[in-house]
Image (cartoon, rainbow, N blue to C red):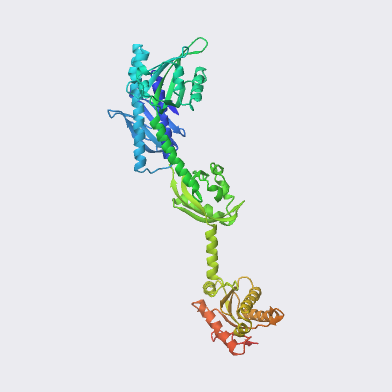
Amino acid sequence: MTTSVSDDPSGILLTEQRDSALQTLCRLARTHFQVASVAIAVQDQDRHGETCLVFDGAPVFQLPDASTDNAPTCIVASCDLTDASGRAVGMLALIDPAPRTFDTTHTTFLRDLAKLAEHAIATAEQGERLHRRIGRMKEDGELTSLALSGSGTGVWDRNVMTGEIHYSPDWHALIGYEPHELSNRIEDAVERLHADDRDYVKAAMQAHFDGNTPSYAVEHRIRCKDGSYKWICSRGKVVSRDGSGRALRMVGTTTDITALRELAQRLQHSIDLVTNLTHQVPGLVFQMHQSPDGQCRFSYASDGIREIYELAPEDLQRDAHAIDALIDPRDLAAYRASQRASAASLTPWRLEYRVNLPRQGLRWREGEARPQRGADGSTVWHGFITDATERKRIEAELQSLATTDHLTQLSNRREFVSQSQAVLDAFRQRVLSCASTLLLDLDHFKVLNDRWGHSLGDRALAHFAALLRAAVEQGAIVARIGGEEFAVLLPGADIESARALAGRLQARLHATPLLHGDERIAMTVSIGIDSMLITDIEAAQTLSRADIALYGAKKRGRNRIEVYRNAARPDIDVIAGVS
């Protein structure tokens, strides 16, 4: 878009052509740097310092002032524009709510764009001065060509009624011809247009002839003398009409924009490459914007969002609230808290969380992003979210292998000791009033193995583990700690409760023999019991005392329950044996 405080009609074509070139540069800069707006402010000294502002993107409400240091706070990068004498003529500014950091490549490219802008401004100023000379001397054709000589812009003058069109020498040179080598027939001019562009150029011209557009302006390809094609920007106006409004005469300018088009193509190629890369990466590459009032939206989301959240990128461009509905309720509070903490302290966001998706069901997601603060107080995250379901499954399996006995699916010795230590810590801190440990050993298990084989021995262990698991109440810690040896920890249970459990377990084992075909294989178990002491430092001490009691049960004939005798405990006066 272009805004100007000048109403001077002289040189309007060159001013429009300058603004078109500057707007093209703004569009290129905005695409390359990915900012909200790009503005070029031009101070016209010949018009008493009046300012023209050309910009692309979001509306710009504050004009940069190239003559002062009072630049808007939203300018993230700028480059002064000067003429050949070093006089300041304007400023090229990148405008964005978020602060940006630019490397050497970005800085060089910004300066190159500024040079192109300086050239466009200088060309327009030169042309405008010469246009004023044309107005004073009343010699349109010859003086217009003189005015634009060397500026890189050609001028044409068309008689709409006769179909004749006259070109300035610079126009001929623009496509490689000498002045005498081109005809003045409009049909020949149309023939030089690229076949793919011909129809829309003719349509744009006709629309202006019919008064449907205020001016004629198109970008198209034209064939040069050597057979190659150049991109040009052609702009013009009808300057006279008859009484019925029919166009009689039209004048305009033509500028070679091949270099700008090639630059735009290279920039678009880079953008396409980056976009394609992010779309091909497994997972979601995103940019999320949170306004100061807490409203979130995804300003960019790669195609990976279709797999990560089963949503389309456009679903989250205005509001990211749809994601909250997909997060597992168990993780929603942590998800929101992690984002608030990241926004408050500008620390990286990192979280593993579960989502419930319509097609995939329950899945794990792992997200990581880095935040930046915008000038308006908003927060922008650039990050990546991947599917962590398989990794979490493997971690769970490894955890199970590390803590579970594979044959009985009870805790293993290592896990039992770890959980017992946690119970002991609670007991010593008076969180628990008591806790008791049972150590159990299947009697004559070696004989059973030798007679029936190891396969039946494994079945016997699994059979006893199932009875043991069914006999204990919720909260008990049950483990196979080695061979045919099992352990039970009862948080909050005293010796008598532990002894009652042991009795029930022996009775259940007696009533539920192991079946092997038609055979009923009876099994018995010896049990040693002890309770935790406030003086215990390690849970292994309780287990060791229960082992001593178990040894007593084995020594006294097996299939017995023995309680460890401790002089410090007056409630247990003897090693009690129950057969």
Q: Is residue 377 visible?
A: no
Q: Residue furthest front?
A: 227
Quarter in which the C terminus is drawn: bottom right
Please provide percent x and percent y for residue 516.
68, 79
Q: Is residue 530 visible?
A: yes
Determine whether, in the image, residue 231 is placed left or right of residue 329: left
Quarter in which the N terminus is drawn: top left
Front in this rendered view, residue 112 or 318 = 112
Number of marks drawn = 0
Q: Residue furthest right?
A: 518
Q: Residue furthest bottom?
A: 556
Please provide percent x and percent y for residue 363.
57, 56
327 lies above or below 143: below
What residue is drawn where x is 54% and y is 87%? 567
Please provide percent x and percent y for residue 445.
61, 83
Residue 90 figure quarter: top left
190 lies above or below 332: above
Determine whether, in the image, residue 493 is placed left or right of residue 275: right
107 lies above or below 252: below
Residue 434 figure quarter: bottom right
406 lies above or below 156: below
